């Protein structure tokens, strides 16, 4: 597993042997970032300077890829201890400790957002077929972890159906082998109106 592009391009990341860590394949990660930058039309994402959130972070590959491409800060949420240590090790490998916050936390009990502020780009890669995707999106929105207009990337099993909460409008989706990647834009007012 390697960083695909940016200042750390080609740098190898540790993937770990734990079955709980399912790193997004290099090809899928490259396709995802190409979609974010070039494939969303008017919703194209400015990664440079962005605050990024990586939930169910696993190895941290998505957030670290964003940092390599110029994101200002990445917060990683993971509750598996082996995965947390893997994220720390990968951040050290890239010398990115100063631009990372790693929180050992349940994605459904986030609490208040960190000092870096709400994320403009968020990645959610929950365990497949566990019904965690929609609740995790709702918790992040309700707790203020997502900026209005944030681009939210959800990875799930290709055959999994996820009904995103109100306030998350689907922009694009694509299948990569056994995985499906869906990209949403988050609208705080629509989420609040439905919640209220």
Image: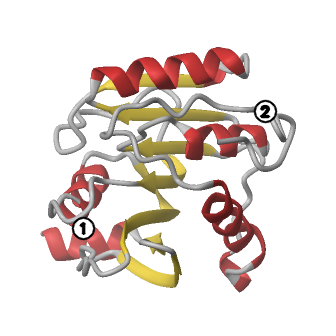
From this view, report whether residue 163 is shown above or below residue 73: below
Query: Which residue does the image show at 38% across and 28% down from the upper left?
Result: 83
- Residue 192's tag is 1
Label 2 sits on a secondary structure element that is loop
Residue at 49% x, 37% y is 117
Corner quadrant of residue 104: top left
Disc number for residue 141: none
Give the quadrant of residue 7.
Answer: top right
Image quadrant holding the C terminus, namely bottom left
Q: Which residue is mark 2?
A: 11
Secondary structure of the residue carrying tag 1 is helix
The residue under the point 69% across, 65% down is 45
Q: Is residue 91 left or right of residue 41?
A: left
Q: Nearer the viewer, residue 136 or 158?
A: 158
- Whether residue 98 is visible to the viewer of this picture, yes or no, is no
Q: Residue at x 38, y 40 (%)?
A: 21
Q: Residues within 10 Å of mark 1 (few under 14, many from 20)?
A: few
Residue 177 in the image: state x and y as whole percent. 50, 74
Residue toward you, 130 or 177: 177
* Quarter that holds the N terminus: top right
Image coords of residue 59 (percent x, y): 49, 35
Q: Is residue 174 above or below residue 100?
A: below
Distance from Cα at disc 1 to Cα at disc 2: 41 Å
Along the line of sight, the residue nearer the viewer: 167 or 96: 96
Q: Position of residue 112 (x, y in %)?
A: 29, 33
Can you give x and y, in whole percent of width and height, for residue 122 in the image?
49, 53
Q: Is residue 38 left or right of residue 126?
A: right
Using residue 8 as the reference point, say whether residue 52 is left or right of it.
left
């Amino acid at each position: 597993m390697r960083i695909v592009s940016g200042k750390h391009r080609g740098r190898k990341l540790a993937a770990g042997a734990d079955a709980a860590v399912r790193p997004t394949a290099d090809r899928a990660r490259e396709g995802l970032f190409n979609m974010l930058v070039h494939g969303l039309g008017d919703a194209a994402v400015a990664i440079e300077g962005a605050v990024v959130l990586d939930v169910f972070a696993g190895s941290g590959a998505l957030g670290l890829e964003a940092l390599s491409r110029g994101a200002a800060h990445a917060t990683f949420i993971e509750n598996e201890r082996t995965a947390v240590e893997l994220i720390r090790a990968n951040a050290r490998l890239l010398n990115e400790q100063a631009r990372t916050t790693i929180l050992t936390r349940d994605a459904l009990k986030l609490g208040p957002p960190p000092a870096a502020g709400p994320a403009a780009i968020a990645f959610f890669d929950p365990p497949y077929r566990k019904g965690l995707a929609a609740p995790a999106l709702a918790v992040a929105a309700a707790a203020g972890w997502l900026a209005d207009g944030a681009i939210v990337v959800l990875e799930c099993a290709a055959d999994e159906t996820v009904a995103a909460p109100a306030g998350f409008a689907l922009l694009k989706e694509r299948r990569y082998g056994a995985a499906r990647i869906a990209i949403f834009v988050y609208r705080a007012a629509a989420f609040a109106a439905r919640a209220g």
